[in-house]
Amino acid sequence: MKSKVDDRKSPIQKEIEVQTLNILRNRITCSGMKNRIIFTDYIDFLVDSQTKKLSMAIHEKKFYYEGKTVKTKYGYEMNPVCQNMQTDYASFEAWALCLKYWLSDQIETVSLRWDEPQHIDVVRQRHYNRFLYRVLKMQEHFEWFSIESENTLTVRNFQTELESGNLYLNIPRNEASIPQKESSEATIEWSFISRKELFKGVDFDACGNQLPVGVFRDSVSNTNALFTGGKSAIDLWAIRSDELWIFELKYRNKKIGILTELLFYLWLMEDLCLNHTIHYGPHTDKTTMPRNFDKFYDRTNGDIVAIHGVLLIDELHPAISPDLLAFINREDRKKRSTIHAQYYKYQSDKKIILL
C-alpha cells in the first residue's frame, strides 16, 4: 500500500496523519470476510474485504424507560436523518469521504442505507428533506457513492418533488448586528468582514456576511419552507471577477461536520449560480438589500462560472487534511467547485492573522 503520509510535510503534520491513519485502522475489527468500523451509536460502517465496498447504515433508535417508550427532546426516537447535519452521527458525507480517502486500499465504493423516520412532524420533515437533497448531491458528484435499493424509491420521489415546482432562496432583510460577546465566532466573523481579507493572497471585488440559504417552494413563506433553517446562512461570501467564494467559519470547533456543512452550501450555490434550478423571487428589490447583497444578486444570473468553498478555521479535525481536500476536488466529477482550507490565528488583541 502506498503511504498516505507525504515525506515533504513537517514532522508535526506527518505525525498527525500517521495517528489519524492508525486510529482508523485500529477501529476495524475482523469478522470473517467483513470488517466493522464503529464511530457513533447511530451509524454502522461495514467493509467487505472481497468487494472493497463500505456499507454505511444509519439507524433510528427508540428511547425506553422501564420497558416503555418515552419522549425526549428528540421525540420518541432519534434518527440522524432528521437532525443537525453538523453532528457526528448525521454528517454521512464527511465520514464517507474521509474513509474512502484514508482507507483507499480497503474501500473502492461506498453505499448508504437508512431507517425511514417514524412519527415525523413538520420540523423533522424539513430536516429529512435536506438529508435527501444531500444524498442526491453525493450521488451526482461522486460516482463511487450509491444508495441501497430499499431507499431508492424515497430518493426518486423526492427528486420528482424537487423538479415539480419552483425553488427560491430567501434574501437578507437587515444589516447584521455587531456581536457583543468577545472571542466568539460572530466576533471573528465581524473582524473578517471589517478587514475584507478572507483568503491569503486573494483580493476580492465585494464581500459580505450571513448570506441566507433558506429554501422554499413556490414562494418564500414559513409554510413553504422545504428545508429546516429559514434563518440559516453562509458565514462569509466574496466575489472575484466571475468566481463566487463562500466561507464556513469555525472557532475552537474540530467537528468533522464542517465538511458536510460546506458541501451542502456549495451544492446550493451551484444550483443557484450554475444550474439555475434554485432562484431568487421574481419581485426581489435589490435597491434595499443590506450586506452588499446587491453585488451578489447581480452575479447570480449567469456571471458566475466557478465556485470556491473555504474552511476558515483555527483548528481542524485531524482526518480533514490538505490531501483529503485535494482528493475531494479530484474525485468530484462535476469539477465546478473547489474546496480549500484557510487557517487563521485570533490573537488576544482581537487581531486576525491569516496563516
Image: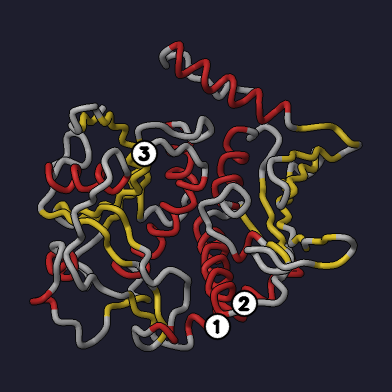
Q: Residues within 10 Å of mark 1 (few under 14, many from 20)?
A: few
Labels 1 and 3: the sequence-earlier one? 1
> In the rendered view, would you say 13 is above or below 182?
above
Q: Nearer the viewer, residue 3 or 64?
A: 64
* Disc number placed over residue 104 in the picture, else none: none
Which residue occupies 43% across, 85% down?
224
User: Along the horizontal axis of the image, is 326 left or right of 77?
Assistant: left
* Disc number placed over residue 251 in the picture, else none: 3
Locate the C terminus by quadrant. top left
Which residue occupies 39% across, 85% down?
166
Q: Is the residue under label 1 in contact with that under label 2 (CB below 8 Å)? A: yes
Q: Position of residue 20 (x, y in %)?
A: 58, 26
Displayed quadrant of residue 64: bottom right
Q: Position of residue 344 (x, y in %)?
A: 28, 32
Q: CA distance from mark 2 to mark 1?
A: 6 Å
User: Along the horizontal axis of the image, is 196 left or right of 148?
Assistant: left
**Closer mark to the observer between disc 3 and disc 2:** 3
Colour convention: secondary structure
Residue at label 1?
160
* Disc number placed over residue 156 in the picture, else none: 2
